[in-house]
Amino acid sequence: MYRQRLTPYLFLLPALLILGLTVFYPALQAFYLSFTRYEYDITQPPLWIGLENFRRLLSDRVFWKTLTNTLIYLIGVVPILVIAPLGLAILVNQTLPGIRWFRAAYYTPVVISMVVAGIAWRWLYAETGLFNQLLRALRLTQDGIPWLTSPNFALFSVMAVTIWKGLGYYMVIYLAGLQSIPADLYEAGAIDGSDGWRKHWDITVPLMRPYLFLVAVISAISATKVFEEVYIMTQGGPRNSSKTLVYYIYESAFQDLEISYACTIGLVMFLLILTLSLLRLSLNRQPADLRF
């Protein structure tokens, strides 16, 4: 009996050791460093300063700007990535000739490297890029739009890339859910008068609630941790208008060499992601008639 209880933990032990060395220990170390002053000098040990980094955080205008940008990113990206991929999944779930090619076309942005995608979209956003050329051809503007060089457009231009890159990924998640719905339900719904697009509101959406919540929490966490798009396309500019929390952590740690302050910002981001995850769990535990 004792061996039977111990055997599963022995199988888990290698994975737990790897997680402990690569995830749990660095996380605890970062938590400790957030209460110290450590500026990437291996000759000097961390100096305990208590809550000084958190006091600095409260008066740091750049931090509040990056936090605001992250929340705007979250609010702007997540609803689109929850709703639009479901519509795409419904379209490509039809039994039509060549539908697999459409599925592959929608999924192609997912397999493209973010570095390649970021550089390509920078060209599209350039002053003489495709977007501004189309706007000039349609006589909508003469000077073009400063997509990445204006504080009013930079963050939203980067958000568009995140949405474009994530549509196919979340579409596949929804597609797996749609293919698990029995066709008999739609036939019964048609008899009751639920046909056309109405059947998706009456049948598809209620049955897809677990997938909707899954996509919501995954896309929310991804939007909170966005970095590559910002680094490649704007590097946080202009005037911090597109700088997010993760980019500010990178900037503090590897450019300003303020490791302890970067850990403090990382702790705030961890709490934000934890809040989103707990919110998703609490919503998922509610009765079915109260969800969504």
Image: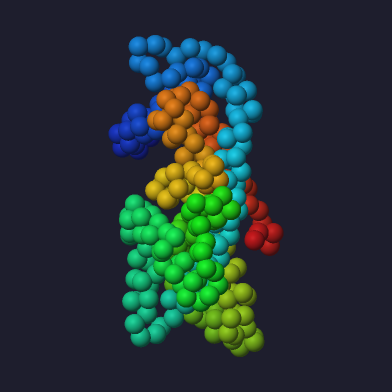
Q: Residue at x 64, y 87 (%)?
A: 193
Q: Residue at x 33, y 59 (%)?
A: 112
Height in image: 220 above or below 263? below
Q: Position of residue 70 (x, y in %)?
A: 56, 45
Q: Position of residue 88 (x, y in %)?
A: 48, 72
Q: Position of residue 98 (x, y in %)?
A: 34, 82
| Left or right of 260 on screen, residue 4 | left
* Residue 174 appears anywhere in the view: no
Q: Position of residue 67 (x, y in %)?
A: 59, 40
Q: Quadrant of residue 96?
A: bottom left
* Residue 141 appears anywhere in the view: yes
Q: Which is nearer the eye, 82 or 163?
A: 163
Height in image: 76 above or below 36? below
Height in image: 210 above or below 58? below
Q: Which is nearer the eye, 97 or 250?
A: 250
Quadrant in which the N terminus is drawn: top left
Q: Which is nearer the eye, 164 or 257?
A: 257
Q: Which is nearer the eye, 77 or 284?
A: 77
